[in-house]
Amino acid sequence: VPVGAAVIGPDGAVLALAGNRREQIGDPTAPAEIHAIREAAATFGDGWRLEGCTLAVTLEPCAMCAGALVSARIGHLVFGAFEPKTN
């Protein structure tokens, strides 16, 4: 499933855009959310805290990505559709 993610900073600026790369690079830890978080963390704040930021993603995050959101201290999540596999 093509999934896209964006991290938006507290001021509304787009900090990162990413797509799902699991199939492309054969890496189960390469969903769009992880790539977007890594890219945003490299340019925002102290290098890992994304406090005040929002993650927008096309599909409900999996458990791994949800954990990454918490670890990065992203305060807001917006997603376009529920993932039926997680219900």
Image (cartoon, rainbow, N blue to C red):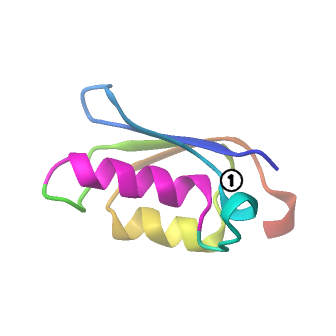
State whether residue 63 appears in this view.
yes
At horizontal 68% and vertical 53% (from top left) the residue drawn is 60
| Picture layout, residue 73 above or below residue 79 | below
Is residue 27 toward the left or the right of residue 2 in the image?
left
| Picture layout, residue 44 above or below residue 70 | above
Position in image of residue 18 (x %, y %) = 54, 44
At horizontal 19% and vertical 59% (from top left) the residue drawn is 47
Which residue in the rendered view is the most extreme toward the top?
A: 12
Which residue in the rendered view is the most extreme toward the front?
A: 25
State whether residue 51 appears in this view.
no
Numbered-mark total: 1
What segment is highlighted magenta in the picture? 30-45
Q: Image quadrant of residue 79?
A: top right
Which residue in the rendered view is the most extreme toward the right?
A: 84
**Predominant SS along the magenta part:** helix
Position in image of residue 62 (x %, y %) = 66, 66
Viewport quadrant of the C terminus? bottom right
Q: Secondary structure at mark 1?
A: loop
Position in image of residue 20 (x %, y %) = 66, 52
Dot 1: few (<14), some (14–19), or many (≥20) neighbours within 10 Å? some
Based on the picture, tell me whether residue 53 belongs to the magenta stretch.
no
Q: Nearer the viewer, residue 60 or 13?
A: 13
Based on the picture, tell me whether residue 42 belongs to the magenta stretch.
yes
Is residue 69 toward the left or the right of residue 81 in the image?
left
At horizontal 15% and vertical 50% (from top left) the residue drawn is 45
Is residue 84 toward the left or the right of residue 28 in the image?
right
Task: Check disc 1 and report the residue beneath it.
Answer: 60
At horizontal 41% and vertical 42% (from top left) the residue drawn is 54
Q: Image quadrant of residue 19?
A: top right
| Picture layout, residue 61 above or below residue 79 | below
